[in-house]
Protein backbone atom coordinates (compact mmCIF):
# COMPACT_ATOMS: atom_id res chain seq x y z
CA UNK A 1 0.00 0.00 0.00
CA UNK A 2 2.66 2.46 1.07
CA UNK A 3 4.93 1.51 -1.81
CA UNK A 4 2.04 1.88 -4.19
CA UNK A 5 1.02 5.33 -3.01
CA UNK A 6 4.57 6.62 -3.14
CA UNK A 7 4.82 5.34 -6.69
CA UNK A 8 1.67 7.26 -7.62
CA UNK A 9 3.18 10.33 -6.05
CA UNK A 10 6.40 9.99 -8.05
CA UNK A 11 4.43 9.63 -11.27
CA UNK A 12 2.51 12.77 -10.34
CA UNK A 13 5.76 14.55 -9.62
CA UNK A 14 7.20 13.48 -12.98
CA UNK A 15 4.14 14.79 -14.78
CA UNK A 16 4.35 17.98 -12.74
CA UNK A 17 7.95 18.79 -13.64
CA UNK A 18 7.54 17.93 -17.30
CA UNK A 19 4.43 20.13 -17.45
CA UNK A 20 6.34 22.99 -15.80
CA UNK A 21 9.02 22.72 -18.47
CA UNK A 22 6.44 22.67 -21.27
CA UNK A 23 4.70 25.62 -19.65
CA UNK A 24 7.98 27.51 -19.46
CA UNK A 25 8.71 27.21 -23.17
CA UNK A 26 5.14 27.71 -24.34
CA UNK A 27 4.61 30.84 -22.27
CA UNK A 28 7.88 32.44 -23.37
CA UNK A 29 6.67 32.07 -26.94
CA UNK A 30 3.57 34.13 -26.20
CA UNK A 31 3.81 37.57 -27.77
CA UNK A 32 3.81 40.36 -25.13
CA UNK A 33 0.86 42.03 -26.85
CA UNK A 34 -1.26 39.05 -25.88
CA UNK A 35 -0.30 38.88 -22.21
CA UNK A 36 -3.78 39.95 -21.10
CA UNK A 37 -5.54 37.24 -23.12
CA UNK A 38 -2.94 34.82 -21.74
CA UNK A 39 -4.15 35.64 -18.25
CA UNK A 40 -7.74 35.16 -19.40
CA UNK A 41 -7.02 31.73 -20.86
CA UNK A 42 -4.92 30.50 -17.95
CA UNK A 43 -7.65 31.70 -15.64
CA UNK A 44 -10.23 29.70 -17.56
CA UNK A 45 -8.18 26.51 -17.79
CA UNK A 46 -7.09 26.60 -14.16
CA UNK A 47 -10.78 26.10 -13.43
CA UNK A 48 -10.32 22.55 -14.67
CA UNK A 49 -10.42 22.09 -10.92
CA UNK A 50 -14.13 21.63 -11.68
CA UNK A 51 -13.18 17.98 -12.27
CA UNK A 52 -12.55 17.58 -8.55
CA UNK A 53 -15.71 19.49 -7.70
CA UNK A 54 -17.82 17.24 -9.94
CA UNK A 55 -16.39 14.13 -8.30
CA UNK A 56 -17.36 15.52 -4.90
CA UNK A 57 -20.82 16.52 -6.08
CA UNK A 58 -21.34 13.21 -7.88
CA UNK A 59 -22.82 10.83 -5.28
CA UNK A 60 -26.56 10.84 -4.67
CA UNK A 61 -28.02 12.25 -1.48
CA UNK A 62 -26.92 15.42 0.27
CA UNK A 63 -23.97 15.51 2.63
CA UNK A 64 -21.40 18.16 3.52
CA UNK A 65 -18.99 16.99 0.88
CA UNK A 66 -21.59 17.16 -1.86
CA UNK A 67 -22.56 20.71 -0.94
CA UNK A 68 -18.91 21.74 -1.03
CA UNK A 69 -18.59 20.03 -4.38
CA UNK A 70 -21.59 21.86 -5.82
CA UNK A 71 -20.28 25.21 -4.59
CA UNK A 72 -16.99 24.33 -6.25
CA UNK A 73 -18.79 23.54 -9.50
CA UNK A 74 -20.58 26.92 -9.45
CA UNK A 75 -17.38 28.86 -8.71
CA UNK A 76 -15.37 27.02 -11.34
CA UNK A 77 -18.13 27.46 -13.94
CA UNK A 78 -18.18 31.21 -13.40
CA UNK A 79 -14.51 31.16 -14.25
CA UNK A 80 -14.69 28.78 -17.17
CA UNK A 81 -17.43 30.69 -18.96
CA UNK A 82 -16.19 34.10 -17.86
CA UNK A 83 -12.54 33.34 -18.64
CA UNK A 84 -13.06 31.93 -22.11
CA UNK A 85 -15.62 34.58 -23.08
CA UNK A 86 -13.56 37.54 -21.94
CA UNK A 87 -10.55 36.07 -23.74
CA UNK A 88 -12.68 35.65 -26.84
CA UNK A 89 -13.70 39.29 -26.61
CA UNK A 90 -10.11 40.43 -26.24
CA UNK A 91 -8.84 38.28 -29.09
CA UNK A 92 -11.57 39.35 -31.49
CA UNK A 93 -10.40 42.93 -31.00
CA UNK A 94 -6.95 41.93 -32.17
CA UNK A 95 -8.53 40.67 -35.39
CA UNK A 96 -8.86 44.03 -37.09
CA UNK A 97 -6.18 44.59 -39.61
CA UNK A 98 -4.77 47.75 -41.12
CA UNK A 99 -6.87 47.17 -44.22
CA UNK A 100 -10.17 47.15 -42.40
CA UNK A 101 -9.50 50.31 -40.45
CA UNK A 102 -8.76 52.10 -43.68
CA UNK A 103 -11.94 50.83 -45.26
CA UNK A 104 -13.90 52.23 -42.38
CA UNK A 105 -12.67 55.73 -43.02
CA UNK B 1 -10.07 5.53 -21.49
CA UNK B 2 -10.52 8.24 -18.88
CA UNK B 3 -6.78 8.78 -18.73
CA UNK B 4 -6.61 9.11 -22.53
CA UNK B 5 -9.43 11.65 -22.64
CA UNK B 6 -7.81 13.66 -19.84
CA UNK B 7 -4.55 13.55 -21.76
CA UNK B 8 -6.25 14.91 -24.89
CA UNK B 9 -7.77 17.65 -22.78
CA UNK B 10 -4.34 18.54 -21.31
CA UNK B 11 -2.80 18.64 -24.79
CA UNK B 12 -5.56 20.94 -25.99
CA UNK B 13 -4.79 23.29 -23.10
CA UNK B 14 -1.14 23.36 -24.14
CA UNK B 15 -2.20 24.22 -27.71
CA UNK B 16 -4.47 26.93 -26.31
CA UNK B 17 -1.44 28.67 -24.78
CA UNK B 18 0.71 27.94 -27.81
CA UNK B 19 -1.85 29.70 -30.02
CA UNK B 20 -1.18 32.96 -28.23
CA UNK B 21 2.22 33.27 -29.91
CA UNK B 22 0.47 35.27 -32.64
CA UNK B 23 -2.83 37.20 -32.79
CA UNK B 24 -3.88 35.27 -35.91
CA UNK B 25 -3.52 31.85 -34.30
CA UNK B 26 -4.80 32.95 -30.92
CA UNK B 27 -8.51 32.59 -31.60
CA UNK B 28 -8.04 28.98 -32.69
CA UNK B 29 -6.09 28.48 -29.47
CA UNK B 30 -9.00 29.74 -27.42
CA UNK B 31 -11.28 27.27 -29.19
CA UNK B 32 -8.84 24.45 -28.36
CA UNK B 33 -9.08 25.53 -24.74
CA UNK B 34 -12.87 25.39 -24.81
CA UNK B 35 -12.87 21.94 -26.41
CA UNK B 36 -10.34 20.73 -23.85
CA UNK B 37 -12.57 21.93 -21.03
CA UNK B 38 -15.68 20.30 -22.52
CA UNK B 39 -13.83 17.00 -22.84
CA UNK B 40 -12.59 17.27 -19.24
CA UNK B 41 -16.07 17.97 -17.86
CA UNK B 42 -17.86 15.25 -19.85
CA UNK B 43 -15.18 12.68 -19.10
CA UNK B 44 -15.66 13.33 -15.40
CA UNK B 45 -19.44 13.11 -15.72
CA UNK B 46 -18.98 9.61 -17.18
CA UNK B 47 -17.47 8.35 -13.90
CA UNK B 48 -19.57 5.60 -12.31
CA UNK B 49 -19.67 7.44 -8.99
CA UNK B 50 -21.07 10.57 -10.58
CA UNK B 51 -24.85 10.26 -10.57
CA UNK B 52 -26.40 13.59 -9.63
CA UNK B 53 -26.49 15.06 -13.12
CA UNK B 54 -29.32 17.48 -12.35
CA UNK B 55 -27.62 19.15 -9.43
CA UNK B 56 -24.31 19.37 -11.29
CA UNK B 57 -26.01 20.61 -14.44
CA UNK B 58 -27.84 23.28 -12.47
CA UNK B 59 -24.60 24.34 -10.75
CA UNK B 60 -22.83 24.65 -14.10
CA UNK B 61 -25.73 26.65 -15.53
CA UNK B 62 -25.83 29.04 -12.58
CA UNK B 63 -22.07 29.56 -12.62
CA UNK B 64 -21.97 29.75 -16.39
CA UNK B 65 -24.73 32.35 -16.52
CA UNK B 66 -23.01 34.54 -13.95
CA UNK B 67 -19.64 34.19 -15.67
CA UNK B 68 -21.03 34.90 -19.14
CA UNK B 69 -23.02 37.87 -17.93
CA UNK B 70 -19.97 39.45 -16.31
CA UNK B 71 -17.59 38.65 -19.17
CA UNK B 72 -19.88 40.12 -21.81
CA UNK B 73 -20.70 43.27 -19.88
CA UNK B 74 -17.31 44.22 -18.49
CA UNK B 75 -15.58 47.35 -19.79
CA UNK B 76 -12.14 46.62 -21.21
CA UNK B 77 -10.62 49.20 -18.88
CA UNK B 78 -11.87 47.13 -15.93
CA UNK B 79 -10.09 43.98 -17.09
CA UNK B 80 -7.47 43.92 -14.32
CA UNK B 81 -10.18 43.90 -11.64
CA UNK B 82 -12.08 41.20 -13.47
CA UNK B 83 -9.03 38.97 -13.73
CA UNK B 84 -8.30 39.47 -10.03
CA UNK B 85 -11.89 38.57 -9.17
CA UNK B 86 -11.70 35.43 -11.30
CA UNK B 87 -8.48 34.38 -9.61
CA UNK B 88 -10.16 34.63 -6.24
CA UNK B 89 -12.83 32.19 -7.44
CA UNK B 90 -10.26 29.61 -8.53
CA UNK B 91 -8.67 29.86 -5.09
CA UNK B 92 -11.99 29.48 -3.33
CA UNK B 93 -12.98 26.56 -5.56
CA UNK B 94 -9.71 24.84 -4.64
CA UNK B 95 -10.52 25.26 -0.94
CA UNK B 96 -13.99 23.78 -1.42
CA UNK B 97 -12.70 20.81 -3.42
CA UNK B 98 -10.09 20.12 -0.76
CA UNK B 99 -12.74 20.37 1.94
CA UNK B 100 -15.01 18.02 0.00
CA UNK B 101 -12.17 15.53 -0.33
CA UNK B 102 -11.54 15.78 3.39
CA UNK B 103 -15.18 15.15 4.33
CA UNK B 104 -15.73 12.38 1.81
CA UNK B 105 -12.36 10.77 1.04
CA UNK B 106 -14.06 7.63 -0.28
CA UNK B 107 -15.45 9.50 -3.29
CA UNK B 108 -11.88 10.38 -4.25
CA UNK B 109 -10.45 6.98 -3.19
CA UNK B 110 -7.90 8.50 -0.85
CA UNK B 111 -8.92 6.54 2.27
CA UNK B 112 -11.73 6.71 4.80
CA UNK B 113 -12.84 9.49 7.14
CA UNK B 114 -10.36 9.62 10.01
CA UNK B 115 -7.80 7.50 8.18
CA UNK B 116 -6.94 9.40 5.04
CA UNK B 117 -3.57 8.59 3.52
CA UNK B 118 -0.79 10.78 4.86
CA UNK B 119 0.41 11.86 1.43
CA UNK B 120 -3.12 12.89 0.47
CA UNK B 121 -3.47 14.91 3.67
CA UNK B 122 -0.27 16.80 2.98
CA UNK B 123 -1.27 17.50 -0.63
CA UNK B 124 -4.76 18.47 0.44
CA UNK B 125 -3.57 20.95 3.02
CA UNK B 126 -1.05 22.50 0.63
CA UNK B 127 -3.81 22.90 -1.96
CA UNK B 128 -6.04 24.46 0.68
CA UNK B 129 -3.30 26.78 1.88
CA UNK B 130 -2.45 28.08 -1.60
CA UNK B 131 -6.11 28.25 -2.58
CA UNK B 132 -7.04 30.32 0.48
CA UNK B 133 -4.11 32.72 -0.06
CA UNK B 134 -5.08 33.11 -3.71
CA UNK B 135 -8.64 33.82 -2.65
CA UNK B 136 -8.01 36.55 -0.10
CA UNK B 137 -5.05 38.06 -1.94
CA UNK B 138 -7.14 38.37 -5.09
CA UNK B 139 -10.08 39.86 -3.23
CA UNK B 140 -7.80 42.54 -1.84
CA UNK B 141 -6.14 43.10 -5.24
CA UNK B 142 -9.62 43.44 -6.73
CA UNK B 143 -10.51 46.05 -4.12
CA UNK B 144 -7.35 48.02 -4.81
CA UNK B 145 -7.82 47.91 -8.58
CA UNK B 146 -11.49 48.78 -8.36
CA UNK B 147 -10.69 51.66 -6.06
CA UNK B 148 -12.87 50.44 -3.19
CA UNK B 149 -9.70 50.11 -1.14
CA UNK B 150 -6.92 52.67 -1.30
CA UNK B 151 -4.28 51.66 -3.81
CA UNK B 152 -1.61 53.04 -1.53
CA UNK B 153 0.65 50.48 0.05
CA UNK B 154 -0.16 49.95 3.71
CA UNK B 155 2.99 49.36 5.66
CA UNK B 156 3.31 48.71 9.36
CA UNK B 157 5.99 47.65 11.77
CA UNK B 158 7.24 44.06 11.86
CA UNK B 159 5.13 43.30 8.79
CA UNK B 160 7.51 40.74 7.35
CA UNK B 161 8.19 39.19 10.73
CA UNK B 162 4.46 38.76 11.33
CA UNK B 163 3.99 37.19 7.90
CA UNK B 164 6.88 34.82 8.51
CA UNK B 165 5.45 33.81 11.89
CA UNK B 166 2.03 33.19 10.36
CA UNK B 167 3.66 31.06 7.68
CA UNK B 168 5.41 28.99 10.35
CA UNK B 169 2.12 28.67 12.21
CA UNK B 170 0.50 27.31 9.05
CA UNK B 171 3.25 24.71 8.63
CA UNK B 172 2.76 23.71 12.25
CA UNK B 173 -1.01 23.45 11.70
CA UNK B 174 -0.50 21.31 8.61
CA UNK B 175 1.69 18.90 10.59
CA UNK B 176 -0.95 18.77 13.31
CA UNK B 177 -3.67 18.22 10.73
CA UNK B 178 -1.81 15.32 9.14
CA UNK B 179 -1.45 13.70 12.56
CA UNK B 180 -4.97 14.04 13.95
CA UNK B 181 -7.10 14.82 10.85
CA UNK B 182 -9.32 17.17 12.82
CA UNK B 183 -11.87 19.29 10.93
CA UNK B 184 -11.24 22.16 13.38
CA UNK B 185 -7.61 22.29 12.36
CA UNK B 186 -8.55 22.07 8.68
CA UNK B 187 -10.69 25.19 8.97
CA UNK B 188 -8.07 26.91 11.10
CA UNK B 189 -5.62 26.41 8.24
CA UNK B 190 -8.17 27.95 5.88
CA UNK B 191 -8.75 30.99 8.08
CA UNK B 192 -5.09 31.63 8.86
CA UNK B 193 -4.19 31.27 5.17
CA UNK B 194 -6.89 33.77 4.25
CA UNK B 195 -5.39 36.17 6.77
CA UNK B 196 -1.93 35.64 5.30
CA UNK B 197 -3.26 36.33 1.79
CA UNK B 198 -4.54 39.72 2.93
CA UNK B 199 -1.31 40.57 4.71
CA UNK B 200 0.81 39.63 1.70
CA UNK B 201 -1.04 41.93 -0.71
CA UNK B 202 -1.73 44.84 1.65
CA UNK B 203 1.74 46.47 1.42
CA UNK B 204 1.78 46.37 -2.38
CA UNK B 205 0.94 49.62 -4.14
CA UNK B 206 -1.22 50.38 -7.17
CA UNK B 207 1.38 50.38 -9.93
CA UNK B 208 2.89 47.12 -8.69
CA UNK B 209 -0.44 45.52 -9.43
CA UNK B 210 0.72 43.95 -12.72
CA UNK B 211 3.14 41.86 -10.67
CA UNK B 212 0.55 41.00 -8.03
CA UNK B 213 -2.08 40.02 -10.57
CA UNK B 214 0.38 37.76 -12.38
CA UNK B 215 1.56 36.30 -9.09
CA UNK B 216 -1.97 35.45 -8.05
CA UNK B 217 -2.45 33.96 -11.51
CA UNK B 218 0.51 31.75 -10.75
CA UNK B 219 -0.83 30.82 -7.29
CA UNK B 220 -4.19 29.80 -8.71
CA UNK B 221 -2.27 27.36 -10.92
CA UNK B 222 -0.29 25.91 -8.03
CA UNK B 223 -3.52 25.52 -6.05
CA UNK B 224 -4.97 23.46 -8.90
CA UNK B 225 -1.76 21.43 -8.87
CA UNK B 226 -2.10 20.74 -5.15
CA UNK B 227 -5.62 19.45 -5.70
CA UNK B 228 -4.34 17.44 -8.68
CA UNK B 229 -1.85 15.68 -6.41
CA UNK B 230 -4.55 15.02 -3.82
CA UNK B 231 -6.76 13.36 -6.41
CA UNK B 232 -3.81 11.81 -8.31
CA UNK B 233 -5.25 13.48 -11.38
CA UNK B 234 -2.70 14.20 -14.12
CA UNK B 235 -4.96 16.64 -15.95
CA UNK B 236 -5.14 18.90 -12.91
CA UNK B 237 -1.42 18.59 -12.29
CA UNK B 238 -0.52 19.45 -15.91
CA UNK B 239 -2.96 22.34 -16.17
CA UNK B 240 -2.00 23.68 -12.77
CA UNK B 241 1.68 23.56 -13.72
CA UNK B 242 1.01 25.36 -17.02
CA UNK B 243 -0.91 28.13 -15.28
CA UNK B 244 1.61 28.31 -12.46
CA UNK B 245 4.50 28.62 -14.90
CA UNK B 246 2.64 31.21 -16.95
CA UNK B 247 1.92 33.42 -13.96
CA UNK B 248 5.46 33.07 -12.70
CA UNK B 249 6.94 34.10 -16.05
CA UNK B 250 4.60 37.08 -16.30
CA UNK B 251 5.58 38.17 -12.78
CA UNK B 252 9.21 37.87 -13.79
CA UNK B 253 8.72 39.94 -16.95
CA UNK B 254 6.82 42.61 -15.00
CA UNK B 255 9.41 42.86 -12.23
CA UNK B 256 12.16 43.08 -14.81
CA UNK B 257 10.22 45.90 -16.48
CA UNK B 258 10.66 47.80 -13.23
CA UNK B 259 14.21 46.62 -12.59
CA UNK B 260 13.12 45.10 -9.30
CA UNK B 261 13.29 41.57 -8.04
CA UNK B 262 10.03 39.75 -7.43
CA UNK B 263 10.98 39.52 -3.77
CA UNK B 264 11.34 43.27 -3.65
CA UNK B 265 7.85 43.73 -5.08
CA UNK B 266 6.35 41.14 -2.76
CA UNK B 267 7.89 42.77 0.27
CA UNK B 268 6.10 45.83 -0.99
CA UNK B 269 5.82 49.35 0.32
CA UNK B 270 7.08 50.90 -2.91
CA UNK B 271 5.60 54.16 -4.06
CA UNK B 272 3.66 56.17 -1.60
CA UNK B 273 4.51 59.57 -0.42
CA UNK B 274 7.65 58.65 1.47
CA UNK B 275 10.10 61.16 0.12
CA UNK B 276 8.31 63.24 -2.47
CA UNK B 277 9.24 66.41 -0.67
CA UNK B 278 12.79 65.25 -0.10
CA UNK B 279 13.41 64.74 -3.80
CA UNK B 280 15.20 67.42 -5.74
CA UNK B 281 13.60 70.79 -5.67
CA UNK B 282 12.26 71.66 -9.08
CA UNK B 283 9.85 74.37 -8.03
CA UNK B 284 11.93 77.17 -9.56
CA UNK B 285 12.25 75.48 -12.91
CA UNK B 286 10.06 76.59 -15.76
CA UNK B 287 7.56 74.35 -17.42
CA UNK B 288 6.50 75.08 -20.97
CA UNK B 289 2.76 74.76 -21.22
CA UNK B 290 0.74 74.31 -24.35
CA UNK B 291 -2.79 73.68 -25.49
CA UNK B 292 -4.48 71.40 -27.99
CA UNK B 293 -3.84 73.74 -30.92
CA UNK B 294 -0.11 73.88 -30.21
CA UNK B 295 -0.02 70.10 -30.03
CA UNK B 296 -1.96 69.76 -33.27
CA UNK B 297 0.41 72.20 -34.98
CA UNK B 298 3.54 70.43 -33.75
CA UNK B 299 2.32 67.01 -34.81
CA UNK B 300 0.97 68.14 -38.16
CA UNK B 301 4.39 69.39 -39.12
CA UNK B 302 6.18 66.23 -38.11
CA UNK B 303 7.08 63.20 -40.21
CA UNK B 304 6.85 60.68 -37.43
CA UNK B 305 5.01 60.48 -34.13
CA UNK B 306 5.36 57.85 -31.43
CA UNK B 307 2.51 57.63 -28.94
CA UNK B 308 3.35 56.40 -25.44
CA UNK B 309 0.21 55.42 -23.52
CA UNK B 310 0.04 54.67 -19.81
CA UNK B 311 -2.45 53.98 -17.06
CA UNK B 312 -3.75 57.56 -17.31
CA UNK B 313 -5.09 56.76 -20.77
CA UNK B 314 -7.03 53.83 -19.34
CA UNK B 315 -8.44 55.89 -16.49
CA UNK B 316 -9.61 58.62 -18.86
CA UNK B 317 -10.88 56.04 -21.41
CA UNK B 318 -8.97 58.05 -23.99
CA UNK B 319 -8.07 55.18 -26.32
CA UNK B 320 -10.80 55.88 -28.89
CA UNK B 321 -10.11 59.60 -29.10
CA UNK B 322 -6.42 58.78 -29.29
CA UNK B 323 -6.92 56.40 -32.19
CA UNK B 324 -8.96 59.04 -34.00
CA UNK B 325 -6.09 61.47 -33.56
CA UNK B 326 -3.68 58.86 -34.88
CA UNK B 327 -5.89 58.22 -37.92
CA UNK B 328 -5.96 61.88 -38.88
CA UNK B 329 -2.19 62.12 -38.56
CA UNK B 330 -1.77 59.01 -40.70
CA UNK B 331 -3.98 60.50 -43.39
CA UNK B 332 -1.66 63.50 -43.40
CA UNK B 333 1.11 61.06 -44.29
CA UNK B 334 2.68 61.06 -40.86
CA UNK B 335 4.08 57.82 -39.53
CA UNK B 336 2.25 56.98 -36.30
CA UNK B 337 3.30 54.19 -33.98
CA UNK B 338 2.59 53.22 -30.40
CA UNK B 339 5.25 52.28 -27.84
CA UNK B 340 4.25 50.04 -24.95
CA UNK B 341 6.30 49.72 -21.81
CA UNK B 342 6.03 46.27 -20.18
CA UNK B 343 4.57 47.69 -16.97
CA UNK B 344 2.28 50.30 -18.50
CA UNK B 345 -1.20 49.86 -17.06
CA UNK B 346 -2.38 47.58 -14.31
CA UNK B 347 -1.95 44.15 -15.84
CA UNK B 348 0.38 42.56 -18.38
CA UNK B 349 -0.68 43.58 -21.89
CA UNK B 350 -3.29 46.03 -20.57
CA UNK B 351 -2.42 48.80 -23.06
CA UNK B 352 -2.38 46.41 -26.02
CA UNK B 353 -5.92 45.31 -25.28
CA UNK B 354 -7.18 48.87 -24.93
CA UNK B 355 -5.56 49.97 -28.18
CA UNK B 356 -6.93 46.88 -29.90
CA UNK B 357 -10.35 47.78 -28.54
CA UNK B 358 -10.01 51.20 -30.13
CA UNK B 359 -9.20 49.52 -33.45
CA UNK B 360 -5.52 50.34 -33.54
CA UNK B 361 -3.93 47.73 -35.84
CA UNK B 362 -1.57 45.60 -33.76
CA UNK B 363 1.25 46.03 -36.29
CA UNK B 364 1.49 49.67 -35.18
CA UNK B 365 1.81 48.75 -31.51
CA UNK B 366 5.39 47.97 -30.56
CA UNK B 367 7.14 46.77 -27.43
CA UNK B 368 9.91 48.64 -25.65
CA UNK B 369 12.84 46.81 -27.22
CA UNK B 370 11.30 46.93 -30.68
CA UNK B 371 10.88 50.68 -30.80
CA UNK B 372 13.29 52.21 -28.31
CA UNK B 373 16.08 52.73 -30.83
CA UNK B 374 13.70 54.67 -33.09
CA UNK B 375 13.16 57.59 -30.73
CA UNK B 376 16.23 59.54 -31.90
CA UNK B 377 14.84 59.44 -35.45
CA UNK B 378 11.40 60.53 -34.30
CA UNK B 379 10.16 64.06 -34.33
CA UNK B 380 7.38 63.96 -31.78
CA UNK B 381 6.75 61.70 -28.80
CA UNK B 382 3.21 61.99 -27.53
CA UNK B 383 3.11 60.73 -23.94
CA UNK B 384 -0.39 60.20 -22.65
CA UNK B 385 -1.03 59.14 -19.08
CA UNK B 386 2.42 57.66 -18.63
CA UNK B 387 5.13 59.15 -16.45
CA UNK B 388 7.63 56.95 -14.65
CA UNK B 389 8.21 54.75 -17.69
CA UNK B 390 9.63 57.77 -19.54
CA UNK B 391 11.62 59.28 -16.70
CA UNK B 392 15.29 59.70 -17.67
CA UNK B 393 16.19 59.70 -13.97
CA UNK B 394 15.99 55.91 -14.27
CA UNK B 395 19.19 56.12 -16.29
CA UNK B 396 21.01 59.01 -14.72
CA UNK B 397 20.04 59.46 -11.09
CA UNK B 398 21.40 56.68 -8.93
CA UNK B 399 19.51 57.91 -5.89
CA UNK B 400 16.17 57.66 -7.65
CA UNK B 401 13.86 54.86 -6.55
CA UNK B 402 13.32 53.94 -10.17
CA UNK B 403 17.03 53.92 -11.06
CA UNK B 404 17.86 51.08 -13.43
CA UNK B 405 14.34 50.63 -14.68
CA UNK B 406 14.27 50.30 -18.47
CA UNK B 407 12.49 53.35 -19.89
CA UNK B 408 11.15 54.49 -23.23
CA UNK B 409 13.69 57.02 -24.49
CA UNK B 410 11.18 59.73 -25.38
CA UNK B 411 13.72 62.38 -24.39
CA UNK B 412 15.75 61.48 -27.48
CA UNK B 413 13.02 62.53 -29.89
CA UNK B 414 13.04 66.09 -31.17
CA UNK B 415 10.11 67.19 -29.10
CA UNK B 416 7.94 65.69 -26.42
CA UNK B 417 4.26 66.35 -25.82
CA UNK B 418 3.18 65.33 -22.36
CA UNK B 419 -0.53 64.94 -21.62
CA UNK B 420 -1.04 65.04 -17.88
CA UNK B 421 -3.75 65.99 -15.47
CA UNK B 422 -1.48 68.07 -13.26
CA UNK B 423 2.14 68.44 -12.23
CA UNK B 424 1.73 65.65 -9.68
CA UNK B 425 4.50 63.09 -9.58
CA UNK B 426 4.00 59.64 -11.02
CA UNK B 427 3.23 56.58 -9.03
CA UNK B 428 6.76 56.18 -7.75
CA UNK B 429 6.62 59.65 -6.21
CA UNK B 430 9.54 60.75 -8.35
CA UNK B 431 9.59 64.04 -10.18
CA UNK B 432 10.22 63.78 -13.91
CA UNK B 433 12.95 66.12 -15.14
CA UNK B 434 11.55 65.68 -18.63
CA UNK B 435 8.84 68.20 -17.78
CA UNK B 436 11.40 70.98 -17.51
CA UNK B 437 13.27 70.34 -20.73
CA UNK B 438 13.20 72.90 -23.53
CA UNK B 439 11.79 70.49 -26.05
CA UNK B 440 8.96 69.37 -23.80
CA UNK B 441 5.49 70.87 -23.97
CA UNK B 442 3.10 70.02 -21.18
CA UNK B 443 -0.55 69.61 -22.10
CA UNK B 444 -2.54 69.80 -18.89
CA UNK B 445 -6.00 68.32 -18.81
CA UNK B 446 -8.03 65.17 -19.04
CA UNK B 447 -6.44 62.77 -21.52
CA UNK B 448 -9.65 62.07 -23.41
CA UNK B 449 -10.67 65.73 -23.61
CA UNK B 450 -7.20 66.67 -24.79
CA UNK B 451 -7.24 64.09 -27.60
CA UNK B 452 -10.67 65.24 -28.71
CA UNK B 453 -9.53 68.86 -28.75
CA UNK B 454 -6.44 67.94 -30.76
CA UNK B 455 -8.65 66.08 -33.23
CA UNK B 456 -10.78 69.21 -33.58
CA UNK B 457 -7.76 71.41 -34.18
CA UNK B 458 -6.32 68.94 -36.65
CA UNK B 459 -9.48 68.76 -38.71
CA UNK B 460 -10.04 72.51 -38.57
Image (spheres, rainbow, N blue to C red):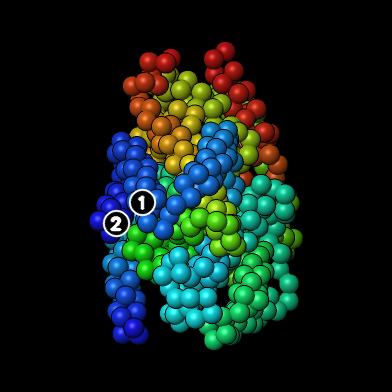
The residue closer to the viewer here, B249 or B143, is: B143
Whether residue B263 appears in this view of the structure is: no
Q: Residue B390: x and y, percent? A: 53, 49
B321 versus B169 height, above or below: above
Q: Which residue is mark 1?
A: B46
**SS at circle 1:** loop
Quick check: B274 left or right of B397?
A: right
Whether residue B170 appears in this view of the structure is: yes
Of callouts 1 and 2, the N-terminal one: 2
Q: Residue at x 68, y 34 (%)?
A: B445
Q: Quadrant of the N terminus of chain B?
A: bottom left
Q: Which residue is mark 2?
A: B2
**SS at circle 2:** helix
Which of discs 1 and 2 lies nearer the camera? The answer is 1
Q: Residue at x 34, y 83 (%)?
A: A1
The residue closer to the viewer here, A28 or B374, is: A28
B295 versus B248 height, above or below: above
Q: Residue at x 54, y 86 (%)?
A: B179
Q: Chain of mark 1?
A: B
Q: Give yes or no for contact between labels 1 and 2 (Cβ–Cβ under 8 Å).
A: yes
Q: Residue at x 46, y 22 (%)?
A: B327
Q: Residue B63: x and y, percent? A: 55, 44
Amino acid sequence: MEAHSSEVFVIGLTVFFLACIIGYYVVWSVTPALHSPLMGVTNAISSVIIVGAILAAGPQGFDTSKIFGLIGVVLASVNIFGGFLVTYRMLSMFKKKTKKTKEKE
Amino acid sequence: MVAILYLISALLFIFALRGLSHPESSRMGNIFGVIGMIIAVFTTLMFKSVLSYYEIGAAILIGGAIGSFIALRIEMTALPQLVAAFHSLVGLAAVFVAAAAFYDPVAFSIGKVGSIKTASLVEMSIGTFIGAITFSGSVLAFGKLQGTISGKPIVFKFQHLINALIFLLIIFLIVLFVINQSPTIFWTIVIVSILLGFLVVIPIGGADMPVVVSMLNSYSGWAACGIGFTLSNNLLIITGALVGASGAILSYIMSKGMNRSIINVVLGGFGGEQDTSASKDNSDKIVKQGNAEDAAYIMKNADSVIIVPGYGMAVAQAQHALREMGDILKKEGIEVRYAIHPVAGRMPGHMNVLLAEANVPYEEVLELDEINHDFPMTEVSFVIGANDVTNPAAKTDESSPIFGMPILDVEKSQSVLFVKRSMATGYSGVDNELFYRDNTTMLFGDAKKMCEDIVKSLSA
